[in-house]
Amino acid sequence: MGVAGLVLAVIGLAAPWFPIDLDQRDAYGFPTRCGNGFSSNLTVALGWLLVTVLLVGGGRTAPSRTDLLS
């Protein structure tokens, strides 16, 4: 019983070092890497982050001078 607990503890402590991949492939056929249990790889997600920021913040314009004076 103690040996089984020790094995499970070692597996649980070692698991975060293994890389996490998605089943999806990028445009060049490479697997989509997400990082591991300690750090994330946001190179795939940064494009969507930029699109989201542009869509949310892109519709806003600065007030004109006449709007500020009235």
Image: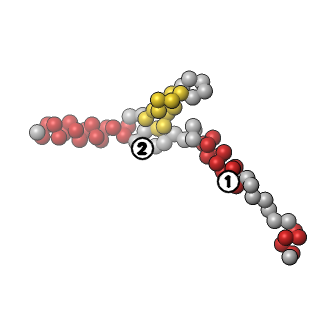
Q: Is residue 33 above or below residue 28?
A: below
**x, y (%) of residue 41?**
51, 39
Structural distance between the alpha carbons of marks 2 and 1: 30 Å
User: Circle 2 sits on which residue?
Assistant: 38
Q: Earlier in the sequence, mark 2 or mark 1?
A: 2
- Eyeballing the image, is 16 above or below 66? above
x then y, percent, for residue 10: 25, 38
Q: Amino acid at mark 1?
A: Val
> Which residue is outermost to the right?
66
Instruction: Find disc 1 in the rendering and name its residue.
Output: 56
Q: Quadrant of the N terminus?
A: top left
x 70%, y 55%: residue: 57
Mark 2 vs mark 1: give the one in front.
Answer: 1
Q: Which numbered marker is on residue 4?
A: none
Asked if residue 26 is positioned above or below residue 44 in the image, the reply reads above
Q: Position of residue 60 (x, y in %)?
A: 75, 58
Q: Which element carries disc 1, helix, strand or loop?
A: helix
Residue at 30%, 41% in the rendered image:
13
Q: How many marks?
A: 2
